[in-house]
């Protein structure tokens, strides 16, 4: 799996902790920044990560900001991205099983490093169910569908 991770300054500390946990679990990934705690605009980082997933350079991405809300809004504006804001493992599992989410968003000022690692690992290890009803619903939210 080709994985990319990124954050703004509000998610920087959580990103650094998460990187250590992902490496311990055997995951390889690219970090697109930010690389310090200086203020950066979350829309730029969120857009860059989402575009990289949508373009097929990566299979999945993990994006963090202070709450996870801003980056998830930005990521979901990129066609082909299904970003899910998850702050618990139940949501992370459902995001993959039911929504085939390809971007995970979390908030560095909302959850701690242990929970973030658990969420990310559940999300990375869970496969899309492929169930017909979930596939139908995903097609309904794609750009150009009859409801989108």
Image (cartoon, grey):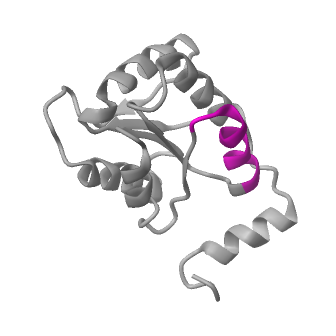
* Residue 8 rendering spot, x and y as whole percentages: 27, 39
User: Left or right of 105: which side holds 16?
Assistant: left
Quadrant assignment for the C terminus = bottom right
Say whether residue 148 is magenta: no
User: Magenta residues, as a range?
Assistant: 87-98
Say whether residue 93 is magenta: yes
Dominant secondary structure (helix, strand or loop) of the stretch shown in magenta = helix
User: Left or right of 37: which side holds 138?
Assistant: right
* Residue 76 rendering spot, x and y as whole percentages: 46, 62
* Residue 6 rendering spot, x and y as whole percentages: 35, 37
Q: Residue at x 42, y 67 (%)?
A: 77
* Residue 103 rendering spot, x and y as whole percentages: 51, 48
**Which of 137/65 is in front?**
65
- Callout count: 0
User: Left or right of 69: which side holds 98?
Assistant: right
Instruction: Residue lying at the far top in this picture: please name it.
Output: 24
**Which of 112/2 is in front?**
112
Instruction: Residue lying at the far front in this picture: please name it.
Output: 110
**Which of 22/70 is in front?**
70
Q: Which residue is drawn at 42% across and 59% down?
A: 73
Q: Residue at x 56, y 85 (%)?
A: 144
């Amino acid at each position: 799996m080709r994985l990319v991770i990124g954050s703004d300054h509000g998610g920087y500390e959580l990103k650094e902790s998460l990187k250590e946990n992902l490496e311990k679990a055997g995951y390889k990934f690219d970090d697109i920044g930010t690389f310090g705690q200086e203020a950066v605009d979350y829309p730029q980082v969120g857009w860059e990560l989402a575009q990289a997933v949508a373009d097929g350079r990566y299979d999945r991405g993990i994006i963090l900001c202070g709450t996870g809300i801003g980056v998830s809004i930005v990521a979901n504006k990129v066609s082909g991205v299904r970003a899910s804001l998850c702050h618990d493992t139940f949501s992370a599992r459902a995001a993959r099983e039911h929504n085939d989410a390809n971007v995970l968003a979390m908030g560095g000022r909302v959850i701690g490093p242990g929970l973030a690692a658990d969420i990310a690992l559940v999300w990375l290890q869970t496969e899309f169910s492929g169930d017909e009803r979930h596939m139908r619903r995903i097609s309904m939210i794609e750009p150009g569908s009859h409801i989108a």
